[in-house]
Amino acid sequence: MDNAALAEALLTVAEALDFLEENPFKAKAYQKAARSIMEMGAPARDIIEHGDITTVAGIGSSIGSVLKTWVVDRDFSLLTDLKARLPHGYFEMIKVPGLGMKKLRTLHRELGLSSVDDLLAAIDDGRLAGLKGFSDKGIARMRRSVLDVIGYRGWYLLDAAWSWMETMIESLSDAGLSVLPTGVCRRGMEVIEGIELLCLDRDGAHDAVQSCLGDVPGGRFSRDGSSYSLHHPEKTPVKVWMEAEESLVPALFVTTGSPSHLEQALMLGERRGVRVSRQGVSHSGTVIPVKDEADIYALLGMPYLPPEVREGRDMEWKPGVDGMLGGLVTRGDLRGILHVHTSMSDGHAPLKDMVRAAKDRGYCWIGISDHSRNAYYAGGLSVKDLKRQGEEIDALNREDPGFTILKGIESDILPDGSLDYPDNILKQLDFVVASVHSHMDMDRDAMTERIVRAIRNPFTSMIGHPTGRLLLSRRPYEVDMDAVMEEAARQGVSLELNAHPMRLDLDWRLIPSFVSRGGRLAINPDAHTPDGLDDVRYGIVIARKGFLTSRACINCLDARTAKEALAARWS
Ligand SMILES: [Zn+2]
Ligand SMILES: [Zn+2]
């Protein structure tokens, strides 16, 4: 278990204790321990196994021994017993926006509701009417959210799907098998229903796959002809297709692209006498051996299209697409990183640790942007805090002139479109990320006007998480993104591609339109921990899906040019 998994398990214990109204100090202690683990620079697992974890501030002896049972004995009974005492649909119910723990407890105790399905039935029967804390308007809104949550069933976020996919590939590879990811996981979709893998079918391969999948604790595996499926109650379903050596490349090609990309490819092939099927490739009836997918695209008269762009848009097949493909942004192109929180607001690590983490990852600059004072729920910075942080940044910049720390803020966009610091404060900063964090239920025109006003503020460098969506949890707010993109491009304000796997906002489908207007994007981790910087990997795949080239990406500039670009409108 890595630090993130340990912290998540500790938080689950805290949440369960909280819901069950057990000793509140105990729940707080688990929260504190989770925070300590998140803030650790080194793997907690090593200390738990070989040292004394209670030497870490915030972890006492009883939680220390719980950690030991998890890591050393692999005994999770505390967690499973606690989960068993929660309503059986608790983790789905808590995802319903506006249904906090207190309301959930009321619904469970007073009406016996244990799942979102129970909740939907109770709303439709009118059983929530008159219940303390539930207004008619709130109930109507809740019903829409409940239907959303039911619709999200069976879908997984990209990070969860990739992490499980990597675990499965590792275990199959350890068993001597050759495995390739394909389908939506290979294309890096933002939400995923299933993981598909292709496995080279050679002597003993079937037995090895069966024993690997059969060994997954809590998993249920089945065989269907030449494929195997693994279902696990908490993980993305996995399908493994067994492929003969000669059909591996065609199968990879056929199963990777979206159905419309494949349809377009097959049509293009037909015109050139090329047939591509899962079994193989032929030209005018003659079988053509292919060593990789580039060979197949060449037969179609196309450059190699990387998996993430194979979505079936016209632009994928346009002449000149190769010129764009070469410039698609890669992790190696990123010189700096923006939108990073520290423990001064709701981040979990102090400024110097976040800076260290950015240096360790090879970046040359970092832009710090804690929450602004309106975001009191996230420890937003007062003017005094901001000044203190600025001094700390100046000192660190003096210490290491080879690395640049930019001073910024993630300023709330207030309902009237203004930012929540006066101009004389904003102009002392290097950049301002303006984000909507409240009043998200405004109507479309009012929300569009609010964001457009924020874009017109001369101190705004970029709009954070432009649509406010939380994947598989909260819909984007109502906003005319065409008007937002138009105004942002006109004013030279960047849009964020928030790389947090729950956001991945700006949606990749909108990127080409924004860039074609001359707009620039920043791939931002919105990191709250040092490891959070690594979320950039999800941002990169989404950026590439949107055909983002390094030229239109703020992160690819050197520190001085980035600073100039971000503050161009007020310096
Ligand atoms: Zn934000
Ligand atoms: Zn943020």
Image (tube, rainbow, N blue to C red):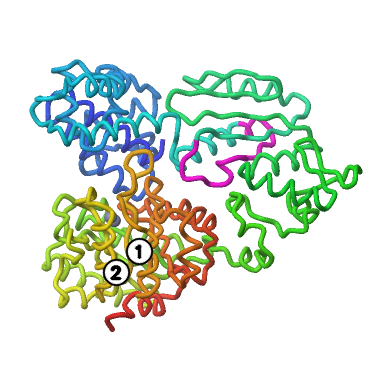
Q: Give the range drawn in magenta.
A: 172-192
Tag 1: residue type? Val
Residue 166 to residue 233: above or below: below
Residue 562 to residue 146: above or below: below
Q: Residue furthest bottom?
A: 571
- Percent position of residue 440, x then y: 23, 50
Whether the residue carrying mark 2 lies under 8 Å from ligand 1 is answered with no
Q: Looking at the rendered structure, which numbered label has been put on residue 455?
A: 2
Image quarter where the C terminus lies is: bottom left
- Percent position of residue 336, x then y: 42, 67
Which residue is at 52% across, 63% downward?
Answer: 548
Q: Relative to 468, is 219 on the left or the right?
A: right
> Do the residues bearing badges 1 and 2 touch, measured as CB atoms within 8 Å?
yes
Q: What element carries label 2?
A: helix
Q: Looking at the rendered structure, which numbered label has been put on residue 484?
A: 1
- Percent position of residue 409, x then y: 24, 65
